[in-house]
Image (tube, helix red, strand yellow):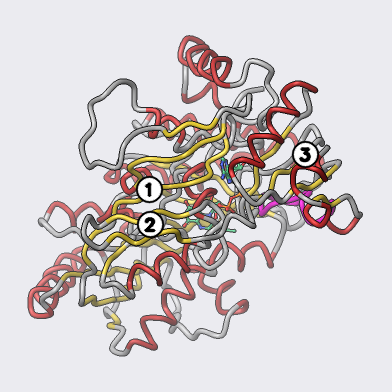
Amino acid sequence: MFRKICGVPHVLTDQESLSDHSHDYTEDLRFPPEVVLKPGSAKEISSILKYCNEKKIPVTPRGAGTGLSGGALPVFAGVVLSTVRLNRIIRIDERNLQAVAEPGVINQEFQDAVIEKGLFYPPDPASRGSCFLGGNLAECAGGPRAVKYGVTKDYVLNCEVVLPNGEIIWTGANVLKNSTGYNLTQLIIGSEGTLGVITKIVFRLIPLPTENLLMLVPFFDARKACEAVSAIFRAGITPSGLEFMERECIEYVMKYVDVKIPLKEGIKAHLLIEVDGNDRDVLMKECEKISDILQNFDCDEVLFADTAQRKAELWKARRAAGEAVKSHSIYKEEDTVVPRAELPVLLEGVKQIGKKYGFKSVCYGHAGDGNLHVNIIRENLSEEDWNEKVPRGIREIFELCVKLGGTISGEHGIGFVQKKYLDIAFTPVQIDVMKGIKKVFDPNGILNPGKIFS
Ligand SMILES: Cc1cc2nc3c(=O)[nH]c(=O)nc-3n(C[C@H](O)[C@H](O)[C@H](O)COP(=O)(O)OP(=O)(O)OC[C@H]3O[C@@H](n4cnc5c(N)ncnc54)[C@H](O)[C@@H]3O)c2cc1C
């Protein structure tokens, strides 16, 4: 049946393909599917889902497989439905500042295509060179620029979705304002492939800023670096990027990619701060103001990236952080998020909890959003400690996030690995409402089963 729908070359059952689609970027988890399908249109996806719904076959949608919460893992085997062939940018509408694209377009390729027209699509996860737009919608991906420009949900006007029963719907309209009925577009965004398969996306674009300045600031105290973050906003400045990296993160990065960053003795953390706009003099003044503020937070000399090459190097270093940590050791990445001014308390809490449960963490992340990626390093931890003690520590970290007014994932989603902690963020009543929504879309539970809920 699948061969009839997709064509023989697009139905894969060989060991190599099954193995390639058995994992994403989440820890070292592997769940091989029974078959990988690479359909070429929404119509083919509709036929696949109709058939699987009738036969109750699990279907796991998959983009590029860069997810960090196990969303694309086929935990009940069945079908992996890859969107890799849906990779066209259909239209860039310069009159309306909109674009229409398929879900298998790589984020960076989309950004580059709109830049050529003088337009800007800001969401830029650090994985932007490989992750797909469909995966970005499904996880509501963020990235460094979210601090000024918002996340994926802020740029999606409408999308075409294939429901688990094979029906094809549009979720809204191609408009900037819409108070017509329930907001199905925003319901699909962040639904982690559990409600429908996204097959076309209408994006909102904005004019491209022409100038940016970047500085790297070393701190002798990591807590003070976190305190400085909210002080910058309180002074009336909204940077276009404000990233935090602990010293150890930079050490791992320098072993992983060819970028040199001066690391004086005693430096505990860095902030990478970017401002953008159209007037260089205004940006210079903002940087001066930021430098003045930072002097109150025990920082060392501010380093300006004075060439395009140096800017690119520093961003490369930041974007490589996740993979650099992964190359060092197996790790669990927690995507904690709190109101920005609570970041220092979160960082300190993470370190104390780590001490209590005997694990080391390396932290970096989108500090301007209060979004701290806590990487718990396995190194020499025993099987027992890794599987029992560490999850107890993670639970305590998440409880702290919620106590501080935050939650358990800022941009990576719940997927497979975080669902056991969902009760920290939501009451049973809230979880029941969500399960009810899932039932309306997918009464047979065929689409991405085992994700978000137990
Ligand atoms: C080095 C690295 C850095 C990262 N940095 C960031 C970052 O800065 N910010 C950030 O937000 N994330 C980041 N991520 C996480 C990841 O890249 C994002 O979650 C990304 O959006 C996933 O896209 P993907 O195409 O790889 O999706 P996949 O991993 O293939 O899938 C993710 C989820 O989306 C669902 N899905 C995929 N396509 C569709 C579709 N068409 N319709 C319905 N559901 C679908 C899947 O079922 C799954 O649940 C990073 C990951 C890595 C490895």
In primary-sequence order, the first of circles 3 and 1 is 3
Foreground tag (1 vs 2)? 1
Residue ID for mark 3: 79
Q: How far separated are the C-alphas under marks 1 and 2? A: 14 Å
Three-letter amino acid code at disc 2?
A: Pro
Q: Secondary structure at mark 2?
A: loop
Three-letter amino acid code at disc 3?
A: Val
- Residue 291, relative to residue 56: is it above or below? below
What secondary structure do most residues of the magenta stretch adopt? Answer: loop
In primary-sequence order, the first of circles 2 and 3 is 3
Which of the 4 image quarters holds residue 47? top right
The magenta stretch spans which residues? 18-28
Label placed on residue 202: 1
The crowd level at tag 3 (other Cα within 10 Å; few <14, some 14-19, many 20+) is many
Residue 155 at what x, y percent from top left? 32, 49
Residue ID for mark 2: 123
Residue 221 at what x, y percent from top left? 36, 62
User: Would you say residue 421 is visible in this rendering?
Assistant: no
Foreground tag (3 vs 1)? 1
Image quarter of the N terminus: top right
Residue 436 at what x, y percent from top left? 53, 13
